[in-house]
Amino acid sequence: MMRLAVRNLFQNRMRLLISVGGVALALMLILSLDAIVSWIEQRVAAYIEASGADVWVSQEGVRNLHMASSSLPADRVDEVAAVPGVESVTPILYVTNVVAMGEERAIAYIIGLPEGAQAGGPWNLVAGEVDPGPEGAVIDQGIAEKSGIGLGDHVEILGRAFEVVGLSGGTSTFTNSIAFIRGQDFSDLRANPGVVSFVLVRVEGGASATEVATRIEAEVEGVTAQTREAFAAQERQVVRDMSTDLLTIMNSVGFLIGLAVMGLTVYTSTLLRRGEHGVLKALGAQNRDLYLSVGLQALVSVGLGLAVGLAFTLLLGAVVPRLVSNLGLRVSLPSVGKAAIASVVFAVAAALLPIRQIHRLDPAMVFRGK
Amino acid sequence: MSDATLRMSEVTKRYGTGATEVTAVRGVSLAIEPGEVVLIMGPSGSGKTTLLLMLGALLRPTEGTIHLNGERISDLSEGRLPGIRLHEFGFIFQDFNLLSALTALENVALVASLAGRKNGEARRKAQDLLSQLGLEARLHFLPEKLSGGEKQRVAIARALVNDPAILFADEPTANLDSKIGRDIMRLLRSIAKEQGRSVVIVSHDQRIKDIADRVLWLEDGEFKEMTTMAVDPVCGMSVVKEGAAATLEQYGVLYHFCSRGCRAEFLNELMD
């Protein structure tokens, strides 16, 4: 029956193309969305991951960067530095605002760095200086290119003009980028001296970041201390929570498209082969033999659809970043697993539809010229 | 293959109920012995196909019984009938009914696989049968590439592949030209006589009478007494007098023809 299923499938190439194409399209939609969100999750946490800090200390209760605000009295910095196991501390200021480049305005995380910061600065400098210096800024290269901005040009941050002294890579997503300025400039513009947003802690060699974080929370009042990994995980979770509804809707759309295409093609294919199924039943084939044939056709179709959908998603992943600087796709194994499960559901559901048709087929029809 | 005897006793088949009820077959009894070629003839709508369907375990009688080797198959559950058809019966159709996506070899081997033969064994058996039927050069051809006669020989190989005791053929020569039709008839006869299989044929083709051991005339769902057969004076075919397509009385002799064409040709020759 395997041979019959495959031959039936490949006999009508146009129907096969529609069926495989439809499934591939549906799975590509599911895979691409997952890959985009996965890429954003990775990018969103990229600053935290690359900050060089082992522990992030924030205002009590603040557990992530995105859409959050943290404010710590400046004297907490010395208190944190005094905790055993802490090698160095870097206080940073942080706010979500915009970088204005002529007519262009791009949402950005504005990071205020102290002079000679040991953590929290740009980690992938493409051109210029790492240290923004007074009235200088390091901005994302992709955002700068998009607006025709280069080194020496001026951008507006927090209402003041800054000279672009450095361009960094890997510091943007399609929602926002990161701009680095001096902490002093940040404080002056916010008119809020004596306050920092986060304290980035490096622990001594051999010390456990988890233990140091626990110790900081115990010894310093009004702070939350998390390891870099825990802080990044929280950041990713925020993005995941924000995109869950969108993902659910789009995945459902993709799922329904795939289901409809597969169901329709398998159903019409079975309908068109009604006569041949009747002949097989007359010759002595059991219903289960025919179910197997239809099921195999559906399974092979969705298998091909999955392969094509995955190939096109990987191709998109290679092409999109070249066309759009602040967007990418990261195809993950769990995402492929999800698409594979969706494929199996497509196949089973599509094969179930014609079963009633086959079950009720009267083999005597073959002799009556139907 | 078993030396099967198929017996039908007082079988009636009715379709519909009440005012729309139609009796297709009424009180028919029939026994088919091993190696026998039985031809069932009759006008259209006489119940021939219904009778064949019941004999072939494709349709249950409304009344009466059908026994195969003593087993009452007319009462078997739906789940057991495909097995009977697969192992005990072979079917040959008017339209050949080969699976269009499979080659000649695969069409035959598939039915052997359905009966539980392993793939290699099924293909070997199919190849042997097709070669015996002169199709060794056509094994890997799709049905669309085969002539009508070749298709019917593939269908015969498919019917034989599980070594059935009884072959049922529904108008096996209807879509074939006369020479090929005659070859198929001879083939069916040799299968019956050399292999001891019973062959039940339903047909309008008068020529098949020549190879039949028994000719039964079914009309209005009942077997009727066969009167003498006549020979078409133009084409030489045997014609059942009751079923002759045309007749002509000339100088006190009643002629029977297989077709109106033969009658017209006969008249033309008389005028010449």
Image (tube, grey):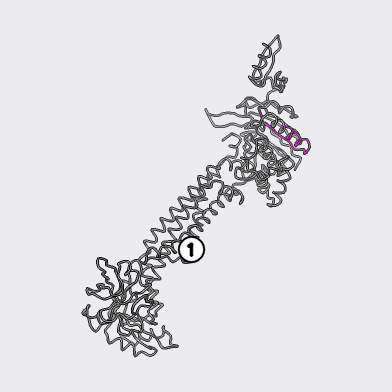
Instruction: Work out whether A281 lies above or below A127.
Output: above
In the image, residue B192 above or below residue B254: below
Place residue B10 in its image quadrant: top right
Q: Position of residue A368 (x, y in %)?
A: 59, 34
Which of the chains bears the disc numbered 1? A
Image x and y of residue B134, in percent: 73, 40
- Write the residue at 60% across / 27% down: B45
- List the single residue furthest toward the right: B194
Say how many tags the image has: 1
**Magenta span of residues:** B185-204
Q: Is B190 within the magenta? A: yes
In which quadrant of the rendered image does the C terminus of chain A lie? top right
Q: Amino acid at mark 1?
A: Val
Residue count near mark 1 (Cα–Cα under 10 Å), binned few <14, some 14–19, many ≥20 = some
Quarter of the image where one finds residue B231: top right
Q: Quadrant of residue A369?
A: top right
- For the question of whether residue A59 can be seen, the reply is no
Residue at point 37%, 66% (across, down) = A325
Per the image, label 1 sits on a secondary structure element best described as helix
* Residue B203 seen in the figure: yes
Q: Nearer the viewer, residue B264 or B201?
A: B264
Residue that extends furthest to the left in the rendered view of this protein = A191
Residue A172 percent across, percent down from the top left: 35, 70
Residue, disc 1: A336
Picture residue at 59% right of the left edge, 28% below the top: B23
Q: Give coordinates of residue A73: x percent, y percent.
A: 26, 84
Q: Is residue A134 left or right of residue A304?
A: left
Task: State whether residue A27 is above or below residue A197.
Answer: above
Q: Is residue A185 left or right of residue A240?
A: left
Residue A308 magenta:
no
